[in-house]
Image: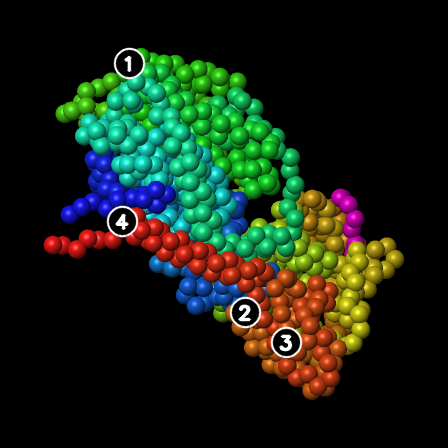
């Protein structure tokens, strides 16, 4: 049968892979290297935690910083959603912050494909579930990198496992990712996006590529953004170092582009690719580096355009989650604005070594095996010069970009993080591992290259000596690792020597990572804020709150002392406490005006224990002093919706006591009398937002923790005035105000509002409907913050003292409000456009292939 011919300008046919590419793909499908990488990773992480006697292997807990404040509570809330036990749904969360948008939090904290696995655990074991997911993500990152390495070129299978595990066990993963488990999705995303780049380079997987991009961006957009930048740099280097680099290159080079080095090392492939202008076999040995010829340059440009299109389609498919997340950040209370301060060079060098820890330097450790192979690559003359220097240059460029202000901002989406300023470090680790693997396509390094590489690693270690972060264990393990890996590379490949070599390398990777894990576990507990772990006391509190729950008739507040920043999500109830990157500015402002307290510069809101605000926000039960306390007769909770008389909305001032009265519509506080003492029988409240220390009234004592800009102490009760003339003692620090609450006045004010409250309220996962009393006019006020996204029927949605409000015209009997997160509709439109663009690209690709193949001749 005659062969089909191509006309000038037509698309190239889909050609069969070369022998080298077929061999590479076949070996990549072998499961043993992937399983070994996962096993090594789990062994190192769990072994290090066990050595440090950290949960779940010992008495030391893991509940530090955002792990306790955000990740565990949000996973607990996801458990409730999946099991149908949450108050609210994917769009609206009725439990935290008196009612907040949940979709941005979902897209930031629990949109990972691994997060739903929490539903397989009992809710009381939520910390076990989060730990298990953390270890699983780390192991999957090792598997993904191992697969990518086998896909890029030939090499011993267990070496691929060791290097894949080294990537997953990098210092960034062990020191930072382990207590920020949402970032570990970025650790997985980097090798996956590099794999997408390979598919694009070869003109393969046009459907799977955009879908992988979409999953990576949905899982955690923040680190996926960094991983995308890193994968783009890797693709650029691959195009510059492999001539058979694109699907548009002429001849068999297009289909055989799994790796130019693989083609060069396969004798059978040399003849196939040489006539096509991409031959790798004989020219690779001459060290010409596989530079792109004139005809290949347009093909490389087309590859980059295809990569951009693939990435754009994938991000568009993720837009229904991404755009609400981005707009949620725009409406959030502003965090700390910091100027980037690059770390000293000696500290950066120290963090390349095992067993170091610091919050403000790049956790760049990736096993000594990787460092030795990267350094040895510089001395390997058999590797083409362009390949050596481009990969080494990429490592240097990524490291340098982490230390320069403009590129630092580029890595972090143009905003310096409030916490660790080196969150992109995992990309450097990935690039180092890819560079280390590059040399294996040309065999193992010889003695000269190993000596040169060992000298470079030793020089880097010596350069780190002035750093305060360098430990004696770091130097000992680095030296031992150098000796072990160099010895393994010099041993014969077969028989018992091959087994010994594998044990030396694997032992170096696992040993260094395990000790680094144990060291980081200990240091975190010393240096970071820690919180009580889940235990019998927290379970008893959660059970008591569940038994008292009466939502939506009234709210149940998780109360004080707090367990974490999101106690309503973790323990249950519907309170004011809330901590997120998306804490709405209007919520922080309203709570602050009413006397609420916060930490984390206004993003971590605390429960407000006050009879006036409890009545206003319908809190009928709260945890206090080790038990659930019901609201007293002086301040029974109001329904979620009340109607206020016609008139202007309250304008808050400096005094939280006056602001509460404005929202309540009645005077209920008295000023202290002569000498600063309250009238006997009134309840004494103190507001000293910047004070730190004990406050007393008689025998009662409470402790304040304030001091802006980091913290704000909430107004607090000092108890009922028992004796005339007893004055409260206030700790020094800023302004202080004392007010005396008259419970009889509060009771009368609440009764007046109750007479104008909704008679029926139906709460939904995306809003509510309230039936108003006959003849109601004025303003219907919902005891929920007026965050962006509310739409109401029967009147225009507005704000009343920071709360959701609707103008009620004569004859109005019901008010119905629906919440849609800002950006959801635009995200859905972008997602639909991405799906259409993906379908169009697939159809055009299929049409091009049909035209290239031409008509099929009939059999005689």
Residue 373, magenta (yes or no): no
Across and down, in percent, residue 193 comes to: 40, 42
Residue 738, magenta (yes or no): yes
Which residue occupies the foreground of this view, 411 or 13? 13
Identify the residue under disc 3: 793
Identify the residue under disc 4: 853
User: Which mark is nearer the camera, 1 or 4?
Assistant: 4
- Give the alpha-carbon distance from disc 4 to disc 2, as whole Å: 53 Å
- Give the alpha-carbon distance from disc 2 to disc 3, as whole Å: 14 Å
Please tell me whether mark 3 sits on a helix, a strand or a loop: strand
Horizontal side of residue 620 vs 440, given as left or right: right
- At x 65%, y 41%, the residue is 337
Identify the residue under disc 1: 447
Q: Contact (CB < 8 A) between labels 1 and 3? A: no
Across and down, in percent, residue 701 comes to: 68, 52
Please tell me whether mark 1 sits on a helix, a strand or a loop: helix
**Span of residues in magenta:** 732-739
- Asked whether the viewer can see residue 816, the reply is yes
- Give the alpha-carbon distance from disc 3 to disc 4, as whole Å: 59 Å
- Whichever of callouts 2 and 3 sits on the residue coming sooner in the sequence is 2
Say if 410 sits above or below 470 in the image.
Answer: below
User: Which mark is nearer the camera, 2 or 3?
Assistant: 3
- At x 50%, y 61%, the residue is 828
Q: Around disc 4, counting alpha carbons within 10 Å, would you say few (fewer than 14), some (14 to 19), or many (20 or more)? A: some
Please tell me whether mark 4 sits on a helix, a strand or a loop: helix
Q: Contact (CB < 8 A) between labels 2 and 3? A: no
* Residue 766: mark in rendering: 2
Q: Contact (CB < 8 A) between labels 1 and 2? A: no
Horizontal side of residue 535 vs 856, given as left or right: right
């Amino acid at each position: 049968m005659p062969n089909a011919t191509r006309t000038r300008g037509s698309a190239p046919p889909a050609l069969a892979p070369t022998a080298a590419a077929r061999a590479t793909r076949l070996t990549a499908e072998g499961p043993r290297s992937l399983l070994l990488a996962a096993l090594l990773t789990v062994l190192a992480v769990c072994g290090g935690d066990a050595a440090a006697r950290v949960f779940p292997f010992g008495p030391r807990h893991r509940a530090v910083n955002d792990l306790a404040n955000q990740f565990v509570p949000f996973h607990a809330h996801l458990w409730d959603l999946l099991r149908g036990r949450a108050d609210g749904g994917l769009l609206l969360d009725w439990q935290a912050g008196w009612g907040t948008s949940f979709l941005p939090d979902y897209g930031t904290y629990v949109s990972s494909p691994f997060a739903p696995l929490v539903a397989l655990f009992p809710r009381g074991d939520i910390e076990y579930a989060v730990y298990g997911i953390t270890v699983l993500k780390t192991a999957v990152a090792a598997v993904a990198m191992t697969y990518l390495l086998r896909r890029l070129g030939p090499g011993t299978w267990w070496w691929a496992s060791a290097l894949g595990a080294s990537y997953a066990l990098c210092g960034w993963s062990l020191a930072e990712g382990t207590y920020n488990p949402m970032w570990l999705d970025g650790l997985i995303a980097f090798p996956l996006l590099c794999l997408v780049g390979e598919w694009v380079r070869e003109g393969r997987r046009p459907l799977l590529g955009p879908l992988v991009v979409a999953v990576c961006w949905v899982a955690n957009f923040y680190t996926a953004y960094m991983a995308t930048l890193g994968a783009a740099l890797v693709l650029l280097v691959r195009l510059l170092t492999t001539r058979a680099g694109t699907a548009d290159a002429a001849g068999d080079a297009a289909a055989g582009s799994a790796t130019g080095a693989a083609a060069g090392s396969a004798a059978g492939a040399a003849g196939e690719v040489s006539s096509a202008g991409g031959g790798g076999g004989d020219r690779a040995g001459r060290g010409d580096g596989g530079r792109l010829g004139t005809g290949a340059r347009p093909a490389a440009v087309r590859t980059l355009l295809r990569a951009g299109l693939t990435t754009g389609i994938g991000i568009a498919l993720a837009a229904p989650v991404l755009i609400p997340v981005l707009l949620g950040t725009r409406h959030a209370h502003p965090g700390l604005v910091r100027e980037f301060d690059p770390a000293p060079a000696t500290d950066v060098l120290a963090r390349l070594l095992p067993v170091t820890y610091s919050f403000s330097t790049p956790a760049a450790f990736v096993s000594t095996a990787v460092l030795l192979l990267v350094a040895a690559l510089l001395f390997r003359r058999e590797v083409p010069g362009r390949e050596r220097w481009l990969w080494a240059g990429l490592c240097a460029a990524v490291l340098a970009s982490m230390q320069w202000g403009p590129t630092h901002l580029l890595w972090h989406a143009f905003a310096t993080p409030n916490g660790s300023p080196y969150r992109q470090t995992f990309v450097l680790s990935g690039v180092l591992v890819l560079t280390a693997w590059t040399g294996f396509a040309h065999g193992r390094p010889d003695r000269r290259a190993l000596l040169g590489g060992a000298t470079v690693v030793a020089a880097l270690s010596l350069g780190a000596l002035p750093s305060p972060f360098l430990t004696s264990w770091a130097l000992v393990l680095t030296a031992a690792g150098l000796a072990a890996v160099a010895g393994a590379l010099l041993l014969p490949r077969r028989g018992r020597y091959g087994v010994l070599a594998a044990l030396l390398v694997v032992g170096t990777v696992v040993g260094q990572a395990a000790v680094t894990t144990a060291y980081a576990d200990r240091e975190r507990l010393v240096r970071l804020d820690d919180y009580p772990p889940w235990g019998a006391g927290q379970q008893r509190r959660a059970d008591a709150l569940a038994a008292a729950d009466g939502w939506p008739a009234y709210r149940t507040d998780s109360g004080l002392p707090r367990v974490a920043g999101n106690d309503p999500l973790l323990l249950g109830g519907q309170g004011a406490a809330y901590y997120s990157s998306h804490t709405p500015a209007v919520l922080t402002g309203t709570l602050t005006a009413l006397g609420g307290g916060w930490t984390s510069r206004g993003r971590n809101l605390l429960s407000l224990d006050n009879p006036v605000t409890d009545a206003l926000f319908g809190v009928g039960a709260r945890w206090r002093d080790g038990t659930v306390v019901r609201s007293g007769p002086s301040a029974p909770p109001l329904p979620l919706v009340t109607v206020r008389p016609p008139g202007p909305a309250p304008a808050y001032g400096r005094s939280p006591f006056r602001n509460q009265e404005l929202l309540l519509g009645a005077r209920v506080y008295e000023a202290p009398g002569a000498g600063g003492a309250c009238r006997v029988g009134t309840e004494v409240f103190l507001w000293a937002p910047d004070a730190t220390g004990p406050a007393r009234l008689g025998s009662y004592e409470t402790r304040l923790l304030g001091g802006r800009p980091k913290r704000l102490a909430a107004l607090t009760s000092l108890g009922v005035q028992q004796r005339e003339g007893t004055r409260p003692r206030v700790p020094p620090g800023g302004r202080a105000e004392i007010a005396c609450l008259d419970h009889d006045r509060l009771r009368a004010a609440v009764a007046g509002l109750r007479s104008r409250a909704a008679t029926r309220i139906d709460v939904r996962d995306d809003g509510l409907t309230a039936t108003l009393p006959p003849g109601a006019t004025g303003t219907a006020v919902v005891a929920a913050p007026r965050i962006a996204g509310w739409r109401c029927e029967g009147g225009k949605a507005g704000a009343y003292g920071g709360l959701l409000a609707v103008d009620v015209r004569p004859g109005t009997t019901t008010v119905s409000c629906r919440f849609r997160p800002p950006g959801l509709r635009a995200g859905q439109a972008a997602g639909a456009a991405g799906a259409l663009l993906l379908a169009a690209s697939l159809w055009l690709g299929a049409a091009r292939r049909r035209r290239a193949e031409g008509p099929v001749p009939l059999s005689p």
